[in-house]
Every structure is written in structure tokens, then in C-alpha cells.
Amino acid sequence: MRSILRDEIRLMHPSSLFSLSENLERLSRDGDPPEVLALTVDFERFRPLLVEWLGYSDGAKGCRPSFDPVSMFKVLVVQAQHNLSKARMEFMIRDRL
């Protein structure tokens, strides 16, 4: 139990410049869920449908750019897979950025 807590603390407070990249490599090696999902599903195939269905504009009117529809679709898939509330999903996104 202590070693798990020690690992979590080390992840939250990297001790060197390279520890973040080492942690990301370890996540990839252990099967990072977003990476596995990206290898399983080709989300870009959904882009034309998402843009059409959501009515995204081309930005000619000068309005604020919309969120990427494929990224939002990925968020909805992960949210449904893990049965997360909107608030929890928002926290997870903010925490990981």
C-alpha cells in the first residue's frame, strides 16, 4: 500500500525534468486507455458526419471557433464507457491537461 502511495506522489510531483516523459512512457507501456481506444476506433471516420449533424460553420462569420467535433465525440465515448457524470468528466479533462 505504501509503495502505491509513494508512486502516486511521485507522479503528482515529478522530481526531474525527464520524470514526466518517463511516466507517460510507462502509461503507454501499461496500456493507457485513451491510446488503446485510439488504436481500436478510427474516430476521424466520424468527422464528416459530426460536422454535418452538429451544423459547424466554416468560421466565415468571425465567431468563436467551436470545439473539435471528434474530440468531443471521444469525450462522450469515454464518459459512457466509464459511466461518468458531466462534472466528473470535466474534472478529469481539466486534471489531465
Image (cartoon, grey):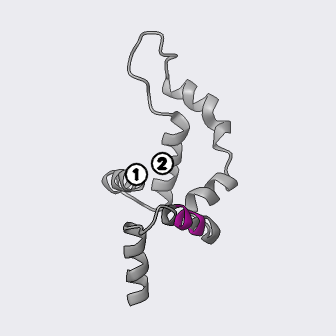
The answer to if 85 sits in the magenta stretch is no
What span is colored magenta in the figure?
21-26
The answer to if 24 sits in the magenta stretch is yes
Which secondary structure, mark 1? Answer: helix
Mark seen at residue 93: 1
Q: Which callout, 1 or 2, points to the residue nearer the camera? A: 1
Residue at left offset 54%, top offset 27%? 53
Q: Amino acid at mark 2?
A: Val
Residue at left offset 39%, top offset 59%? 84
Up-down relation of residue 29 to residue 78 (above or below): below
Foreground: 90 or 11? 11
Q: Is residue 1 visible?
A: no
Residue at left offset 63%, top offset 37%? 46
Total numbered badges shown on the rendered structure: 2
Do the CB atoms of the residues marked 1 and 2 lie less than 8 Å apart? yes
Residue 9, percent from left and from top: 37, 75
The 10 Å Cα crowd at callout 1, few under 14, some 14 to 19, many 20 or more, is few
State which quarter of the image contains the N terminus: bottom left
Up-down relation of residue 13 to residue 72 (above or below): below
Mark before the other along the chain sequence, 1 or 2: 2
Residue 91, percent from left and from top: 33, 54
Q: Is residue 79 left or right of residue 90?
A: right
Q: Is residue 51 left or right of residue 96?
A: right
Question: Would you name the residue on which mark 2 appears?
Answer: 75
Q: Amino acid at mark 1?
A: Ile
